[in-house]
Image (cartoon, rainbow, N blue to C red):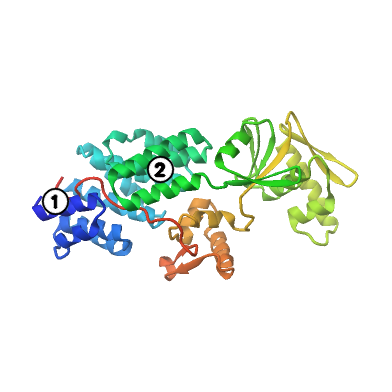
Amino acid sequence: MDSLIAAAARFLAVGDPLSALKRIALRDDAPALALRGIAMAQLGDLVRARELLKRAVRAFGSRDAVARARCVVAEAEIALVSRELTWPVGALTKARGVLARRGDRLNAAHAGCIEARRLLLIGRLEEAGRLLAEVDPPALSPASRAGYELAVAGIAMRRLQMRPARAAMARAQRAARAAGIAALEAEVEGVAQLMGEPAARLISDGKEQLLSLEEVEELFATDSLIIDACRNVIRQNGTVVSLATRPVLLALAQALAEAWPADVPRDVLLRRAFRARHADESHRARLRVEIGRLRSEIGPLAQLVATERGFALRPQGADGVVVLTPTTQEQHAAVLALLADGESWSSSALAIALAVSPRSVQRALSQLSEAGKVQSFGQGRARRWMRPPVPGFPTTLLLPGPLPGG
């Protein structure tokens, strides 16, 4: 490795892409192309960064498998930040294997972190956890260790295990300070601040209050029957009934829980479940069918009792009934929640992350755009969506070791 390449790699490792470019900007050999790609990624020009990395892969050729694999890892991180969830993740897995076999523990571990962060983004927590368990944290650079700990914290937060989440966040903050990269420190601090913000709204006894993640965790430890409209389930004492594919049943359960211990008139249930302003006999017949289905689904947790006016919820073994909803009652709150990370998303990536059809996401984005709540740029497949104004900080892109030549 010549002196200019070595110097550029050192500057990239501490988050100084401009100093790196001063040494390699006019060079087109394979190591310089790779480092220029990393530098452009750190500067935020992800399109140019990807082009340079692809050129570097071709320039390295088949003889330098390690350098090629490192370029693939860099491309994968760019895809993650660009929220291109259709990027061929198999290439990253293959590159990780090459790096591990050739003894590059540093970049192999970094590749595992990237793959785990992608799995976390699309809600595959078990797979993400298994992958992170294979990563050797001491093998990571401070910057990559910060990303690793953020992923660990993210999994714990999604599982509402706040003590390990905060411990992982503290480790991420220490790693970010050790890396000495201002943008990375700001990103970690931004995530830490989000942990203290309201995560859900509780409806109980006709009153509403905002809850933090810790308070949600405490609520789940009680004996209350919880209609969880955040995750589309009904839960009590570890028993969980999923209504993720039954929105009508969830709407009925939420209406009954909000009125508990009183009953809910049939016309109110019809409006909540079917949005029927003028109910006819077919609506009432459908309500009877859906009530029967809901009674069957939640039988282990509660009973549905017919009253003169309508129906009432009667929990079994619960000390109360509460409803947990998102902090915002937006029609497309899930889409807005993903866009809140400050990154630009494609509609296809949103569909993957939400596990819904691309057409459903496109309709949601169209309605949100008309309301001025999201904005797009680009055309066709290059179109990306984000929330205005964009909060937060860009993710720091860097490979933890010298890219070219080993």
Type of the residue with mark 1: Ala
Residue located farthest toward the top when viewing the structure as drawn: 317
Q: Quadrant of the C terminus?
A: top left
Q: Nearer the viewer, residue 148 or 125?
A: 148
Where is residue 104 shown, x and y percent of the image?
21, 40
User: Is residue 144 visible to the viewer in this orientation of the structure?
Assistant: no
> Label 2, on which residue?
150
- Bin the neighbour count of mark 2 within 10 Å (Cα to Cα): few under 14, some 14-19, many 20 and up: many
Check disc 2 and report its element: helix, strand or loop: helix
Q: Is residue 297 above or below residue 359?
A: above
User: Is residue 394 visible to the viewer in this orientation of the structure?
Assistant: yes
Type of the residue with mark 2: Leu
Q: Is residue 35 above or below residue 210?
A: below
Where is residue 245 shown, x and y percent of the image?
63, 47
Measured Cα–Cα span from mark 2 to mark 1: 29 Å
Residue at point 46%, 33% (across, down): 164
Q: Nearer the viewer, residue 45 or 291?
A: 45
Residue at point 44%, 67% (across, down): 383
> Label 1, on which residue?
6
